[in-house]
Image: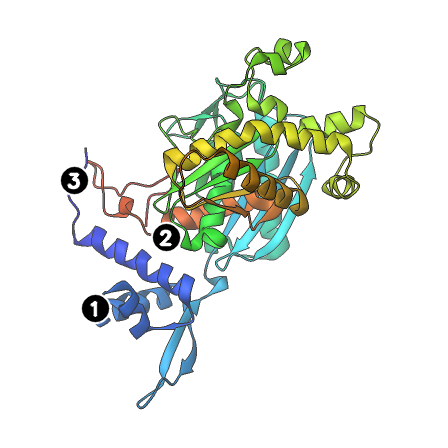
Amino acid sequence: MLLGTNLKHAKAYNFRIILETIRRFGPISRADVARRTELTAQTVSNITRELLGMGLIYEAERRRDGRGAPSILLAINPDGAYSIGLDLDRDHLTALLVDFAGQIRRRVYQTLEGVLPPEQAMDLLARTAERLLQDTGVPREKVWGIGVGIPGPLDVSKDGHVTNIANPRAFPGWRRVPVVDILEQRLRLPIFLENNATAAAVGERWYGAGQHIPTFFYVFFSEGLGGGLIFNGLPYDGYTGNAGELGYCYLPPEIFSAEDLHVFKKPHLGILFSVPRLYRQLQEAGYTARSLEDLEQLFQDKNPVLIDWLHEGLEHLAPIILAIEYIIDPEAIFFGGRLPETIIAYIIEWLQQRLAELRIEEKPPVRLLPGTAGVDAAALGVATLPLYVQLAPGLHVLLKTGNGEALTPTRSSAPAR
């Protein structure tokens, strides 16, 4: 049941709006904040005083715009809050500690030899988070939470249990794993759980080129092919929490090998257009390919295996991108993940030409853009979640459930602030 808002929830919304205005446009004066938000000078003064007391902003400098006393400018305090992002995939763990300005203070990367059992994975995540805190000396009380990213599709209950029914090959043995409960008990911090493609989209919205784009789609290349949707400024997870799973779009079986069909049963795009498949095909053809640097060099050399992988995958991806363009009508579609920037740029250039050929009606074409976080997109995205959920403005802050709590746009163990 949804109830009408009250003064408490309106204040929470104004709090977020003012903080977001300072984050995007700062250093900025209180008067300019009031003009941009259309809030009263008194409201802006009261809330900025509270933000200063919390240490989330600081008085940066004075600026003289004309006659009279110079204006005091407000800016985000990078040391005002921190968050941790843990991106767990089938073959690696990337962990980041990020400050309030989005700067990465510490990065840890670890290669994994296959999927870890849940117990080992939870232990690794907890130990890695503790290591980030110890290495940086950041006080635990300044950490607003820990974001955890796991590849979709996932079935994540409201209490943080993970059930991987849709794709048991992705994380075999992961059945009813209480990720949030386990990590919260170990780390004594709020835990935020999300699939890594949606997390990458959140990171782009909060820190990247998506800051001024309220509705966009993010195509994420990793162990599979995923996607995340930001709709009117908020992540859209869908009914089951798996919105954007591009890799599971059906393809005709005749384009697959008998081995592919035996392993995967139902033909889909993610079989053809995944980064692990590219590495495997290159190695089978006798080429050295173990890193992004190897892929970069092979691309510069116009390696035929890599080029064939790209063209085959893009031919099937293009109609899906066109469907996203027509059905969702986003302002932009970002591309990122575990591919070199040069290959991402090629993908965008190729799709721009192909989509121009496929469009049935004349319309302003959607912008195709590279993600700004590169290979750390998912890790930065999940590191963003604690701050994004608790501080980003949105309609969910004005809505509340029957118990009076504000709605939050993603799964977590922390209430909206």
- The residue closer to the viewer here, 226 or 187, is 226
Q: Which mark is first along the chain, 3 or 2?
A: 3
Q: Secondary structure at mark 2?
A: helix
- The residue closer to the viewer here, 362 or 20, is 362
Q: Tell me the amino acid under the disc marked 2.
A: Leu
Label 1 packing within 10 angstroms: few (<14), some (14-19), many (20+) = few
Q: Tell me the amino acid under the disc marked 3.
A: Leu
**Which residue: 60% across, 44% down?**
349
- In the figure, residue 31 lies in which quadrant? bottom left
Q: Tell me the amino acid under the disc marked 1.
A: Thr
Q: Write down the residue under mark 1.
A: 40
Residue 25: mark: none
Q: Secondary structure at mark 1?
A: loop
Residue 3: mark: 3
- Please determine whether, in this image, residue 71 is positioned above or below residue 262: below
Residue 61 shown left or right of residue 123 in the figure? left
Q: Secondary structure at mark 3?
A: loop
Residue 86 visible in the shown view: no
Residue 108 % position (x, y): 65, 46
Q: CA distance from mark 2 to mark 3?
A: 21 Å
